[in-house]
């Protein structure tokens, strides 16, 4: 919501001379805090992506940098969770078979993502990501 209203609140912070399209620069501690929240939310409720998107969007990364950063973050978060899930005995043969059956869709998703990423402007890309972030938030509140 803050990102949708950015043209209105950013001048109130004394940034009236700057474009509302400029990136916000976060401090290192803010990134570490966002990372810790993303890890905790991802582990407890598989909602770490919301925190990552809220942290990255105001930085105005290019489409490719945004997708690469979120992909690396999700990969790392999920990789870290594997030993803990294994220790909790959450893996089974059925889950392994299902994961293998779904592997081809990873390639399909990557190819589709690359194609769409090259066709969509950065402004539209940000609006699409914001829409899905907002919709996910509403779903979590109502669901």
Image (cartoon, rainbow, N blue to C red):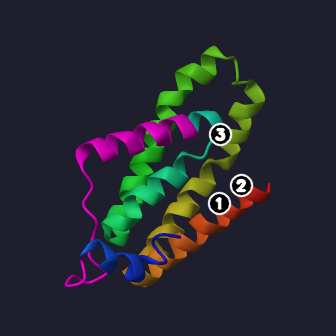
The tag on residue 137 is 1
Mark 1 → mark 2, Cα distance in angstroms:
5 Å
Marks 2 and 3, how far apart in space? Answer: 11 Å
Q: Which of marks 2 and 3 is nearer the N terminus?
A: 3
In screen coordinates, is 7 left or right of 143?
A: left
* Residue 45 versus residue 64 in the image, above or below: above
**Proximity of marks 1 and 2: CB atoms separated by less than 8 Å:** yes
Residue identified by numbered label 2: 140
The mark nearer the N terminus, 3 or 1, is 3
Looking at the rendered structure, the secondary structure element under dot 1 is helix
Residue plotted at (61% across, 48% down) = 103
Q: Is mark 3 on a helix, strand or loop?
A: helix
In the image, farthest residue toward the top = 87
Q: Nearer the viewer, residue 16 or 92?
A: 16
Left or right: 40 as drawn, with respect to 23 = right
Task: Decide which of 80, 28 is in the foreground and name it.
Answer: 28
Mark 3 highlights which residue?
Answer: 45
Residue 40 image position (x, y, % from top left): 53, 35
Structural crowding at the residue carrying mark 2, measured as other residues with C-alpha within 10 Å and reported as few (<14), some (14–19) or many (≥20): few
* Residue 39 forms part of the magenta stretch: yes
Marks 3 and 1, how far apart at CA: 13 Å
Image quadrant in which you'd find residue 6: bottom left
Q: Could you tell me residue 126's position as x and y percent?
A: 45, 75
Q: Residue at x 69, y 32 (%)?
A: 96
Badge 1: residue crowd in 10 Å (few <14, some 14–19, many ≥20): some
Mark 3 vs mark 1: in front: 1
């Amino acid at each position: 919501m803050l990102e949708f209203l950015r043209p209105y609140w950013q001048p109130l912070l004394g940034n009236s001379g700057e474009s509302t399209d400029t990136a916000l620069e976060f401090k290192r501690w803010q990134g570490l805090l966002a990372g810790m929240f993303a890890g905790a939310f991802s582990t407890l409720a598989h909602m770490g992506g919301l925190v990552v998107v809220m942290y990255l969007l105001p930085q105005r990364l290019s489409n490719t940098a945004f997708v690469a950063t979120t992909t690396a973050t999700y990969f790392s978060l999920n990789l870290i969770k594997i030993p803990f899930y294994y220790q909790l005995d959450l893996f089974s043969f059925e889950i392994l078979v299902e994961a293998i059956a779904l592997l081809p869709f990873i390639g399909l998703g990557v190819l589709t993502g690359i194609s769409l990423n090259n066709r969509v402007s950065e402004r539209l890309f940000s609006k699409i990501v914001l829409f899905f972030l907002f919709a996910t938030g509403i779903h979590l509140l109502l669901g």
